[in-house]
Amino acid sequence: MELQISQRDTDVLLKQKNVLETSVIDKYRLAGQVTQTCLSYLISLINDSYHLGEHAPYSAAELCLLGDSYIKSALSTAYKNHVREKGIAQPVTIDVNDVVVGYSPEIDEEVNIYFKPGDIVTINVGSHVDGYTANGSHTIVIYPPGVLSEDGSKKPTGPLLGASADAVCAAHIASETVIALLAGTLTPEKLPQSLTGANKVVNGSLIRSIVDSIAESFHCVVVPTSKVRRIRRFLAGQSEGVVAERDFKGVVWSEADQELQLLQKSSKFAEQGTQLIAFDKSKNAAVNNSSAIPTDDFVITPGEVYSVDIKMAAIQGNEGPGLVTLQTVDNITGKDHSNDTFSPRPSIYVRDVTVSHQLKLKSSRKLLNTIDKSLSVYPFKLSHISDSFPIDLSKDIKEQLKNIQSDMKSARLGLSELVNRHIAVNKPIQRARFIPLQVILNASTSTGINGYDAENPTLPGLELPLPRLGVTSLKLKTLLKSSVQIPVARELSTVVLNTTTNQLIRLSGGSTTAKPSWVHSNYQLGGQYVEGINELIQSTQDERFGIKIKECLPMKIKFASDATISGEIEMET
């Protein structure tokens, strides 16, 4: 659905408000600092509890609540009386192993998870100031309890090995390469000619080709929903699949990008001599400058803000070629298409501003009024509407948790009506799954290419996951019973291409906050771009003549002995 907005208002919202003036960059910087601090804070909690053994391990629900509380508290006094909307842009999610996105359990969740050695854990956070957003994700490794070294500190007994290590390496190298490539657009003369050619232009096709090459080097696959996209004020991808975004600009990976490579490996198609052609996502669609359909036909322009979200899944150890896809899970029996015990209920919701309805329940009207007044267009959780949120670490923690649970209980009835009327849409919890190619080739689609999965909306133009084979999303869902789980590593950074100083401002991620974990892969970087990638990374390390990248540093955190749920750290800025 398209909102009716005048051309004048469109120019103000999409163009004038996104010019990188000093005031706008300052808001981006503050959001980046808060995101970086929250990410650093959660990593320290995990290290202290799981690796150093300084206190009892934190559960995923506790980490999510502490992270959300920190972001809300840190921005409560910023731009007071000057900025109306600020706070959480992405509720903290803790995604473990094959979970790709969306797992953020509430404190009243019946099933809560703890980590075990060998797990890879992705922490996803986000904050915004006046709609200027900084999201960040980083994957860390859970090691066995550390052993004492000669200097008295505890260190892991060894690096992580196997498929998870391959995914972590591929995601880190791909993310750093893309960010360096974006930074090079500010000073094109410093870009390696072996990457961009003589024209020194960075476009969507080049970004896709480089990331795919890195994935192939480490025997990995770029997981669907990975993207390198432009973001703007209040438009950071939080409502993708719910509301189409005009002037979408970015590279998006989907199952269709794996399809051609898989068919080339199939003996059935080789024997028949079937000619394979590249699939054009924009075919039979009006693609222009104002289109919402993703296409690689764009050029990176300085003065914009980009989100670099790379997810990698290692296919090492799987028998034969296959497809990496996503599976939506929930707590309703039979909907997750598997026999495992991981069946959480979605806890993150987003307001669909294009839908209105006359609500019957008083609790529904009260909840909707609270959402529209204080939670803006960004995702939210029920715990965020409680009067006891964010938790005050200087007061009785148990009493505050009890109050939050009580407020959530009374709001769930109202939320049910909002969801049923599609006023609020839940953000799905998705897991990565590997489906063997033979299973896909033997499948038949009774609904033809017109079958559409309304429960899991996607970006425009990506409704048909396997267009060459004519396999719809509904049919692909039925094939998940023959799939196996596959670990995923994710790196997400938000970057600003600042034309005033000709440097890239990295709002989230980086070596200071998101230092890569100790892993060892049996593979190394190769392919046609290896020389150019090495030259590009070396250029970013030359502080005098190289490509300029400035990383937002986290704020200082005050440590205390009796402050959090488990009684360890106090969050103050």
Image (cartoon, helix red, strand yellow):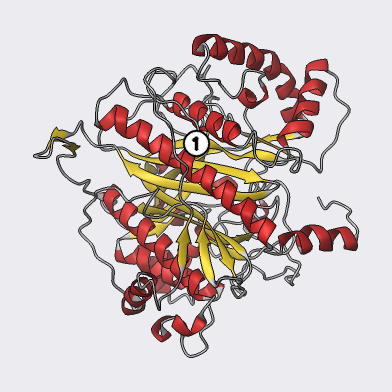
Residue 463 seen in render = no
Look at 72% across and 29% down and name the residue there: 419
Of 165 and 281, the residue lying toward us:
165
Which residue: 71% across, 38% down? Answer: 80
Image position, residue 82 (x, y; %): 75, 43
Instruction: State left or right for residue 417 relative to residue 402.
Output: right
> Total marks drawn?
1
What residue lies at 46% left-to-right and 65% top-to-bottom?
Answer: 549
In this image, 70 relative to 81: left or right?
Answer: left
267 above or below 194?
above
Question: In screen coordinates, is 119 left or right of 243?
Answer: left
Say which element carries label 1.
Answer: strand
Would residue 230 appear left or right of 566 to someone viewing this image? right
Q: According to the image, label 1 marks what residue?
A: 93
Q: How crowded is mark 1: few (under 14 residues within 10 Å), some or many (20 or more)?
A: many
Residue 245 seen in render: yes
Q: Position of residue 79 (x, y in %)?
A: 69, 42
Front-most of residues 112 and 396: 396
The picture quadrant where one finds residue 494 is bottom right
Q: Residue 532: where, in percent of width, then height?
A: 36, 78
Kind of residue at badge 1? Thr
Which residue of the protein is positioned furthest toward the bottom in this rendering?
198
Task: Estimate the x, y position of residue 99 in percent, counting from the top left.
Answer: 43, 39
- Above or below: residue 493 compared with residue 363: below
